[in-house]
Image (spheres, rainbow, N blue to C red):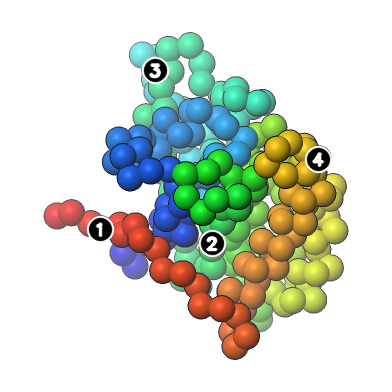
Amino acid sequence: MGPLRPLTPLLRILRYFASRQIKHRATVGGNLCNASPIGDLAPALIALGAQVVLRSAAGARTLPLEQFFLAYRKTALQPGEVLAAVRVPEPPAGARMAAYKVSKRRELDISAVAAGLYVETCPEGLVTEVRAAFGGMAATPARARGLEAALRGKPWTEATVEAALPALAGDFTPMTDHRGSAWFRGQVAENLVRGFYLETAATPRPDLPPRPAATVRLEVVP
């Protein structure tokens, strides 16, 4: 596995993330510390199991990224602390993951809903680990714990996904604003989960359109 393999799900959203100038000057840490509930990176990194290292003169501590966001635009950073690093674990072979951004425009637009989805299955096809994180569905980027519980231990099939989707309604209470109604956001979130299953199913659907290639390339510089 290459050292950047855990980051490949970010390629999809990076294609539509900000402008070229911002992408060349901004930082991942700055994006996370902004703590926007509709930021694009946080759901993807949460789904990947990322941790943040917070450092101060007194020492360092590590938190799961999902615990970094406490409330609307409020983080776990204490006075004198900085976000020093973001750690993404190497996923096991066979893990499936994807990141999504839904907005009115394709480029230079703020998301109505963003999602990061991750699933591991055992040789028998049962879900052994699942993380589903969303932005635009609550005051902070957050995991859909009810959906995850409804999927865990079940066969990774279309029927399982459909049976689990109603749990999303209990996971979030999205708001209505100029980017979309609460109903719209709920429907989008459900359809992103459906799309993730169809993209990662063992038997590809021939009627699905081709996935667009990313325009951002990650390289290892020796």
**Residue at image mark 4:** 173
Q: Residue 89: x, y in percent?
A: 44, 52
Residue density around tag 4, few if under 14, some if 14–19, many if 20 or more, within 10 Å: some
Q: Label 3 vs label 4: CA separation?
A: 35 Å
Residue 87 position (above or below residue 205):
above
Q: In this view, does 162 lie to the left or right of 210?
A: right
Instruction: Find the distance from the CA under tag 3 to the CA under tag 2.
Output: 33 Å
Give the label on residue 219, or none: 1
Can the viewer see residue 15? Answer: yes
Name of the residue lying farthest toward the left? 222
Q: Report the Cα–Cα distance between label 4 and label 1.
A: 39 Å
Which numbered disc, 2 or 1, marks the residue that appears first in the sequence?
A: 2
Label 2 crowd bin: few (<14), some (14–19), many (20+), radius 10 Å = many
Is disc 1 surrounded by few (<14), some (14 to 19) or many (20+) residues within 10 Å?
few
The residue labelled by disc 2 is 98
Q: Distance between the residues labelled 2 and 1?
A: 19 Å
Which of discs 3 and 2 lies nearer the camera? The answer is 2
Instruction: Find residue 10 and report its horizontal and vertical position in percent.
Output: 45, 55
Q: Name the residue under label 3.
A: 56
Relative to 187, is 24 above or below? above
Q: Which residue is drawn at 66% across and 78% down?
A: 125
Question: Which quadrant of the view contains residue 72?
Answer: top right
On the picture, is 85 further left or further right than 115? left
Look at label 3 and name its amino acid: Ser
Whether residues under marks 3 and 1 lie with C-beta atoms below 8 angstroms apart, the answer is no
SS for callout 2: strand
Q: Earlier in the sequence, mark 3 or mark 2?
A: 3
* Tag 3 near tag 4, CB within 8 Å: no
Disc 1 is placed on an element classified as loop
